[in-house]
Image (tube, rainbow, N blue to C red):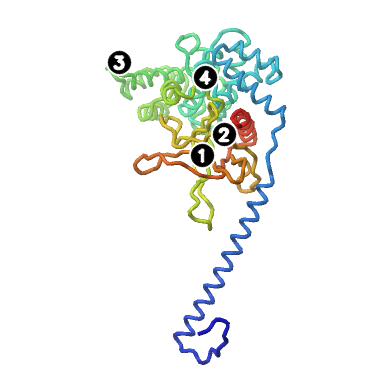
C-alpha cells in the first residue's frame, strides 16, 4: 500500500480492522506521551531560568564563616571572636549555641564543641543551656533523646563536665517531654536515669568489662528511682533492651574516624540527591538520601554518614550552583556546568563490583531539608565554586 493513499475500511478483513484500531490507539497513546514530555521540558526550561544569584557580600560572608569554623576547631575562643567581630554571630549565649548546633552538622569539630560547652565558665554554661534546648526531644523516649543529644558533640572525659551536661539535659527533658507514660515527676529522676544510661552503655559494650550487668542487676542499680520516684520496671526494661541492642554511637566512634581525610570540611549533612540515570526520558527520576561532605573544592557523597569511602565525587571546577524552583520539592538546588558544551567530570562507584566510573553529566540536583539548610549549602558551595574557576 502506497503512503498517502486512502482506502475504504469496508474492504478490510476483520483482522486488519482490529490491527488498524490497535495502531490508532497506539498512535493516540504516543501523542499523549509526546505532549507529556513537551510539558515536562517546558517546566524544566522554566526552572533553569530561575538562577540563584549569590552576590559578593554573600560570598564574603560564606568565606568568613568557613574561616571562623576552622579557627574554632583549633581555638574555640579565637574562632568565636573572629566571627563576632565580623558580625557573623552575636556575643550572646543563644547566637553562639545556634552556631554550634548548626555547625555540628557542617564541619565543626564535635570534640571541640564538647570541650566548649563543658566548660564551667558562666557564659559557657549559658551556651550549654541554650544548646541543649535546641534539641527537639519532646516526643522521644529517654534513650532516644540521649542518642540525639550525644551525637551532636563528643562527650568530654571529665566527670564534672559530664555531670553538668547531664543535669542540663535532664532539665530540658523533664520540661519538654510529652510522651505518654515516659515523663518523670522531677528533673532529678531524668538526671539519675540519664547518667545510668551512660553507665549501662559502658558496662554492656566496653570490651574491657567482663562482668556484664543483667536486666535484673540494672533494675537493682536503679532501685531508689523505682521506689522513690515512681519509675516502673517496664521503663527500665525498655532502657536496658534499647541500649543492649544498640550502643550509643558517639562521634569519636563513627564520624571522626570514618572521614579523617575531611577534617577541614566546609559543610556536611544529609541531602536528597536526584538519580543521574538518564537512560529513560519518560517518568520522574528517583531521589536518594545521601550524606554529603563539602571539602577542598569537591563535593563528596556517601550512602551513610559512617562510610569510609565516598560513593561519588563532584569536583567544583568550572561549575556553578543555583536554586531550582519546584513546588513538589521546595528546597532544591543544582550544580551545573558553566558552559553548555561542557560536562561535570565526576566519578562514581558502581553498585556491582565497586568499579569506579566517570560521570559525564551537565548538572546534579539535590534537595535540602529546610530553607536555612538550602541557603547554607548554596552559599558554601558557591564560595568553593568561585575558588575553583579557571
Which image quadrant is residue 136 in?
A: top right
Image location of residue 190, percent across then percent down? 50, 21
| Image: 362 above or below 12 | above
In the image shown, does 211 or 340 lie closer to the viewer?
A: 340
Q: Are marks 1 and 2 in contact (CB under 8 Å)?
A: yes
In the image shown, does 27 or 200 lie closer to the viewer?
A: 27
Query: Can you identify the residue that label 3 sits on?
Result: 208
Which disc, if any, is residue 345? 1
Label 4 and label 1: CA atoms lie apart by 30 Å
Residue at 60%, 17% in the rendered image: 129
Q: Are marks 4 and 2 in contact (CB under 8 Å)?
A: no
Residue at 44%, 39% in the rendered image: 348
Q: Within 10 Å of the Cα at label 3, are there few (<14), some (14-19), or many (20+) other Cα atoms? A: few
Q: Are marks 4 and 1 in contact (CB under 8 Å)?
A: no
In the image shown, does 223 or 198 lie closer to the viewer?
A: 198
Between marks 3 and 1 in the image, the one whose residue lies nearer the viewer: 1
Which disc, if any, is residue 317? 2
Left or right, 187 with reference to 311: right
Image location of residue 144, percent across then percent down? 47, 29
Query: Can you identify the residue that label 4 sits on?
Result: 109
Label 3 and label 1: CA atoms lie apart by 48 Å
Image location of residue 308, percent across then percent down? 41, 29
Q: Earlier in the sequence, mark 4 or mark 1?
A: 4
**Could you say whether the residue bearing mark 4 is in a helix, strand or loop?**
loop
Between marks 4 and 1 in the image, the one whose residue lies nearer the viewer: 1
Amino acid at each position: 500500500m502506497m503512503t498517502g493513499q486512502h482506502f475504504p475500511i469496508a474492504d478490510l478483513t476483520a483482522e486488519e480492522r482490529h490491527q488498524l484500531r490497535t495502531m490508532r490507539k497506539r498512535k493516540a497513546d504516543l501523542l499523549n506521551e509526546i505532549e507529556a514530555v513537551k510539558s515536562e521540558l517546558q517546566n524544566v526550561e522554566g526552572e533553569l531560568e530561575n538562577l540563584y544569584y549569590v552576590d559578593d557580600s554573600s560570598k564574603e560572608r560564606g568565606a568568613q564563616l568557613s574561616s571562623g569554623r576552622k579557627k574554632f576547631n583549633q581555638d574555640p575562643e579565637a574562632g568565636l571572636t573572629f566571627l563576632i567581630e565580623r558580625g557573623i554571630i552575636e556575643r550572646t549565649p543563644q547566637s553562639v549555641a545556634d552556631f554550634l548546633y548548626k555547625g555540628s552538622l557542617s564541619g565543626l569539630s564535635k570534640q571541640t564543641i564538647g570541650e566548649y560547652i563543658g566548660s564551667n565558665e558562666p557564659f559557657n554554661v549559658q551556651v550549654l543551656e541554650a544548646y541543649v534546648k535546641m534539641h527537639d526531644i519532646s516526643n522521644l523516649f529517654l534513650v532516644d533523646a540521649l542518642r540525639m543529644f550525644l551525637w551532636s558533640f563528643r562527650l568530654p572525659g571529665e566527670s564534672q563536665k559530664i555531670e553538668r551536661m547531664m543535669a542540663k539535659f535532664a532539665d530540658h527533658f523533664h520540661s519538654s517531654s510529652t510522651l505518654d507514660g515516659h515523663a518523670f515527676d522531677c528533673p532529678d529522676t531524668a538526671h539519675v536515669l540519664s547518667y545510668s544510661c551512660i553507665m549501662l552503655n559502658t558496662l554492656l559494650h566496653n570490651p574491657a568489662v567482663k562482668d556484664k550487668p543483667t536486666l535484673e542487676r540494672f533494675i537493682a542499680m536503679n532501685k531508689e528511682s523505682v521506689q522513690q520516684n515512681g519509675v516502673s520496671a517496664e521503663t527500665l526494661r525498655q532502657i536496658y533492651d534499647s541500649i543492649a541492642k544498640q550502643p550509643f554511637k558517639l562521634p569519636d566512634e563513627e564520624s571522626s574516624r570514618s572521614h579523617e581525610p575531611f577534617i577541614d570540611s566546609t559543610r556536611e549533612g544529609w541531602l536528597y540527591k536526584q538519580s543521574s540515570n538518564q537512560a529513560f526520558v519518560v517518568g520522574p527520576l528517583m531521589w536518594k538520601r545521601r550524606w554529603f561532605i563539602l571539602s577542598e573544592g569537591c563535593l563528596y557523597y556517601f550512602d551513610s554518614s559512617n562510610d569510609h569511602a565516598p560513593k561519588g565525587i563532584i569536583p567544583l571546577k568550572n561549575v556553578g550552583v543555583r536554586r531550582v524552583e519546584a513546588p513538589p520539592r521546595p528546597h532544591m538546588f543544582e550544580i551545573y556546568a558553566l558552559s553548555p558544551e561542557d560536562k561535570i567530570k565526576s566519578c562514581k562507584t558502581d553498585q556491582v563490583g565497586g568499579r569506579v566510573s566517570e560521570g559525564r553529566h551537565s548538572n546534579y540536583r539535590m534537595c535540602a531539608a529546610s530553607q536555612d539548610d538550602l541557603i547554607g549549602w548554596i552559599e558554601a558551595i558557591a564560595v568553593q565554586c568561585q575558588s575553583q574557576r579557571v
